[in-house]
Image (tube, helix red, strand yellow):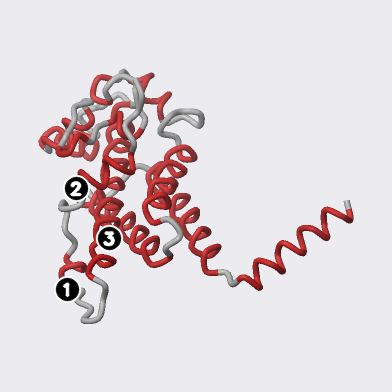
């Protein structure tokens, strides 16, 4: 089964969801309405992809250990996820508003809610589908593809990733698994490097390309 295109689905699904108070307050008299609408859509898409990814991380982290009655934080997070119908449907492999599903992010395995302890561990292992490296690459590629070479749009997407992460913290008990923080750091680092690259002047690029060529000749 071919995975649904993440960029297309996310834009269709999330353009009107999870509205940001900051976006409501922001009013630029001379702003291009179409550009502002585009950036708002990118921002909201990034927010929701971030929330979705962190929800997966939280659930996998809980599933990968044997829960005990004493582990109240994990128990509370699990109940919060189960009680959130949209998130639980998403983790169960069902499509939510606009057709967004696990398949939209390229995942075609067993529904997250049906995984065994060992299967959950495998998914977050170094080679797993939801490992730090693979998830950070997937999320950063998603927002970079949305924004293209538009620096302002990419900055807006970055804000969305951060906002989604913060909302996920609130939703799932104030503290996410360590793997979530590692993934977030790596994701933002990739985005920041892309922004830095886009902000370089043509002269800077020529200088760097010249230095690279000199090094290759010396070798």
Decide if residue 39 is on the left or right side of residue 195. Answer: left
* Front residue of 200 and 102: 200
In the picture provided, is 119 more to the left or to the right than 128? Answer: left
The residue that disc 1 covers is: 25
Q: Which residue is mark 3?
A: 38
Q: Which residue is mark 2?
A: 171
Where does residue 60 sit, x and y in percent of width and height? 32, 31
The CA distance from mark 1 to mark 3 is 17 Å
Q: In the rendered image, which quarter is residue 106 located in?
A: top left
When asked about the image quadrant of residue 61, the answer is top left
Task: Give SS at disc 2.
Answer: helix
Kind of element beneath mark 1? helix
* Mark 3 surroundings: few (<14), some (14-19) or many (≥20) residues within 10 A: some
Residue neighbourhood size for the residue with mark 1, other residues' Cα within 10 Å, grouped as few (<14), some (14–19), many (≥20): few
At horizontal 53% and vertical 59% (from top left) the residue drawn is 193
**Relative side of 191 to 11, left or right:** right
Q: Nearer the viewer, residue 28 or 121?
A: 28
Q: Residue furthest bottom?
A: 29
Q: Residue at x 26, y 27 (%)?
A: 67
Front one among 201 and 60: 201
The percent position of residue 37, horizontal first and vertical second, equals: 23, 63
Q: Which of the two labelled residues, at mark 1 and mark 3, occupies the earlier sequence position? A: 1
Mark 2 to mark 3: distance in Å? 27 Å
Residue 68, x across and y down, in percent: 24, 27
């Amino acid at each position: 089964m071919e995975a649904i295109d993440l960029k297309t689905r996310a834009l269709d699904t999330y353009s009107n969801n999870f509205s940001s108070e900051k976006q409501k307050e922001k009013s630029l008299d001379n702003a291009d309405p179409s550009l502002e609408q585009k950036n708002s859509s990118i921002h909201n898409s990034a927010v929701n992809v971030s929330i979705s990814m962190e929800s997966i991380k939280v659930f996998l982290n809980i599933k990968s250990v044997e829960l005990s009655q004493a582990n109240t934080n994990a128990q509370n997070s699990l109940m919060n996820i189960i009680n959130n119908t949209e998130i639980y449907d998403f983790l169960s492999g069902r499509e939510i508003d606009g057709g967004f599903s696990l398949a939209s992010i390229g995942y075609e395995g067993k529904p997250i809610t049906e995984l065994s302890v060992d299967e959950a561990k495998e998914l977050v292992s170094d080679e797993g589908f939801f490992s730090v490296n693979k998830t950070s690459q997937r999320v950063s590629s998603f927002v970079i593809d949305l924004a293209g070479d538009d620096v302002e749009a990419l900055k807006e997407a970055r804000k969305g990733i951060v906002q989604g992460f913060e909302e996920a913290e609130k939703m799932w008990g104030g503290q996410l698994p360590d793997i979530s923080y590692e993934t977030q750091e790596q994701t933002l680092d990739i985005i920041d490097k892309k922004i830095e690259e886009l902000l370089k002047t043509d002269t800077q690029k020529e200088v760097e390309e010249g230095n690279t060529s000199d090094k290759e000749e010396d070798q």
